[in-house]
Amino acid sequence: MPVTLVGFRIFGALSGMAMAIVLTSQLGAAQFGLIAQALSLAMLLSLFCTLGLEAACPKFLIGNIEQSDFKAARSFVYFNFLVTIAMSVIVVSAAFWVLGSTSPSTTIAILAAPIVALTRMAAGFSMGFSNVYAAVIPRSFLRPFLCLCLVASVVYQSTAAPIHWVLICFFLANFLVFVVQTVTLARPIAQLRREAGAQKVSFVDWCKWLGFGTVIGGSILFIEFFQHISILIASITLPASDIAYLDVCMKLVGFVTFGIVAVNQSYLPRNAQAFFGFETTKLQALLRQAAMIRCIASALGVAVIYFAGPSVLRLFGAEFSAAMPVLNVLLWLPFLIGFFGPAANMLSITDHPVVLLKIVTVALISLCVGVTLGGKFGGVIGVAYGVVFSWLVWGALVAFVTWRRMGVDTTFIALIINHRTNSRRQAT
């Protein structure tokens, strides 16, 4: 992952954290908890609006363009756009029907879901056209930065601004991001239209597109959306102030986990080359090297957050000092992610996406059960333990399946033991 993209993602995360500080300091934990619930609803619904088809863009769009099959590429773009529009109508209607009477903030969140979905699809198109910067920067940096600016201006005008104004800012920020994405996509889509010429759009491969997209989209449901799912489920049993504690603590832990995931992603191309080249020794060396970096990164990150946590939490308001026990529990997440290593990444390069979807399904069930029971019997700390438990289930399953199907054990202990065993063999 290029350093500039990492920098933009970090600045985007810092913008989101700054917005949380502004909101909690002005509105309090309870109001911020309601905002977190509404935002999580919008983000989760957006995935159902696209059916995960944006994840299929790198495979089909790049593949068709490389093979000069511009008709298929153009048809794929049209199909994705039409599915997003149709599913947005269905999802929004279903959400209003299921929830019945909703608050203004929830109403805006539901209406914002299609806009968020369009930004997701546009990012997928940009990735399909090999424009990584256009795929990452608008959603990872521009959206949280615009949200921060809009929310700060609203709070500056009125410190007692209703929370639905925050959701309006979220809606506007996503709309502006989609406008920027549309501008950046105008040229490659126009070129694709010229290359396709007079050939008519054909959806003959719709089943293949939809099947692959939904499988990959379902696979990222746990990895990318576990925070939003946790907040929505926890809101059933917990008060809004506890939801605020959970959201802020997850954001803080996210800084450490982001660094660990970045290490896994940066090594993925070389790991894939070594695996498909049957270079077992090189693959073990790469995995071991990445494991040591993850170990150091997670240890340093956890130590910093653990010791600086009380001071950082006070930035959100005095009442957030009570969230420190929640933060201590969630700090197990970086260790789990670092321990099990890039097993999911390794499995994703094979032809077994359905297997990954099955593992995600089990992990999602464990997350829902863990958060529900944890919230009922242990409050917000119980929810934190439920989240950690689901990641333990996810990591253990995906590492085991990777070992069984690929013969690669990505766990930290296995890599160290194998290294010592090989060193002893070479010495003798």
Image (cartoon, helix red, strand yellow):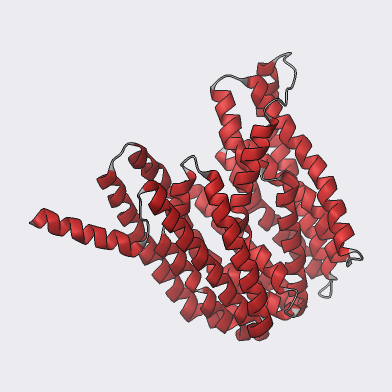
Q: In which quadrant of the rendered view does residue 144 lie?
A: bottom right
Q: Which of the 4 quarters of the picture holds residue 325?
A: bottom right
Residue lying furthest right in this view?
101
Q: On the picture, is 393 further left or further right than 57? A: left
**Percent of width and height locating residue 171:** 79, 55
Q: Is residue 421 left or right of residue 171?
A: left
Q: Could you tell me if residue 259 is visible in this image? A: no
Q: Looking at the picture, tell me which residue is in the foreground, 127 or 210.
A: 210
At a point 59% along the width and 52% down the height, the residue shown is: 220
Residue 383 lies, in percent from the top left, at: 62, 76
Q: Residue at x 83, y 64 (%)?
A: 106
In terms of depth relative to the viewer, which is nearer, 43 or 169?
43
Residue 240 vertical position relative to residue 101 in the rendered view, above or below: below
Q: Is residue 209 above or below residue 144?
A: above
> Percent x, y for residue 120?
68, 46
When the figure is inspected, residue 127 is found, relative to residue 189, above or below; the finding is: below
